[in-house]
Image (spheres, rainbow, N blue to C red):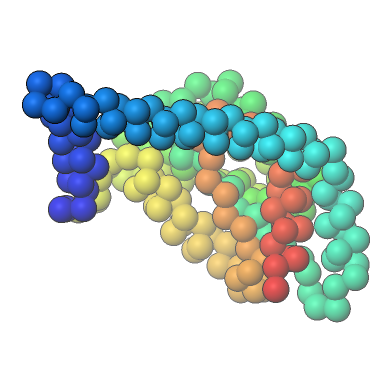
Amino acid sequence: RLCCCVPGVVLFSLVGVLGVTPFLCPAAFLTLTAVLSAISLGWTANMGVACVFGARRLRQCTTVDWHSKLVQLQEEYTEDSDVLHVVILPNYKEDEKMLLQTLEGIAESPMARSCIRVVLAMEEREGAAAEAKASRLIARMADRFANICATYHPADLPGDLVGKSSNTQWAYRHALQRYSAKLNQFDASRVFVTVGDADTLWHDQYFSYIAYDGLCMP
């Protein structure tokens, strides 16, 4: 708790010092202002350079056929190299059309039908509307994934705070139970859990890249 107070204490102390030093010691005020300006300028320049290099690297990565590289790597592997993706989408009173677009984006992955299992993490407090929405989405997208299901996070769990984190945890535990038989067939290093928002749009090579990167790890 004390550590959480440190940033606020530093910030307000600095503001107080800047408010007092012009009257007590103008030279100190000018020095402090110059130092802070230099730090701010340096941070801004660093972020600008990082953004340029990051955008360049991102563009380079999106031109690679990661799924082909993954398939080639799996063929060269001496051990079992199958992977499993579990995608959790926590949501509450989200627009059904938006959720459908998110699911369709995930389904664009070449791995969707064979390796991707989607969990629609609904909130029980949304009521019958959540069940109806999930049922329609599952019926529409069932043939696009290895599996798709819905969970309903109870609103009255003791000691449980209502929110995205608790909903995600509930969905994760449900996924462990639902897919336990399948998960037992995989080494933990080949199971990838991804959590996204209801409006997240993934690149169609994203899941292939994650799997490729994971298999390349020592």
Q: Quadrant of the C terminus?
A: bottom right
Q: Image check: 35 left or right of 189?
A: left
Q: Image check: 79 left or right of 68?
A: left
Q: Position of residue 195 (x, y in %)?
A: 53, 46
Q: Is residue 83 above or below residue 79?
A: above
Count up the numbered dots: 0
Q: 109 or 45: nearer the eye?
A: 45
Q: Is residue 24 above or below residue 141?
A: above
Q: Is residue 182 above or below residue 125?
A: below
Q: Image check: 197 left or right of 32?
A: right
Q: Position of residue 73 (x, y in %)?
A: 86, 64
Q: Quadrant of residue 23?
A: top left
- Which residue is at a point 82% across and 49% down the rendered structure image? 66
Q: Position of residue 204 (x, y in %)?
A: 76, 38
Q: Residue furthest front?
A: 27
Q: Quadrant of residue 136?
A: top right
- Which residue is at a point 89% across and 51% down the rendered structure image? 68
- Which residue is at a point 24% across and 42% down the rendered structure image? 7
Q: Quadrant of residue 14?
A: top left
Q: Is residue 61 visible?
A: yes
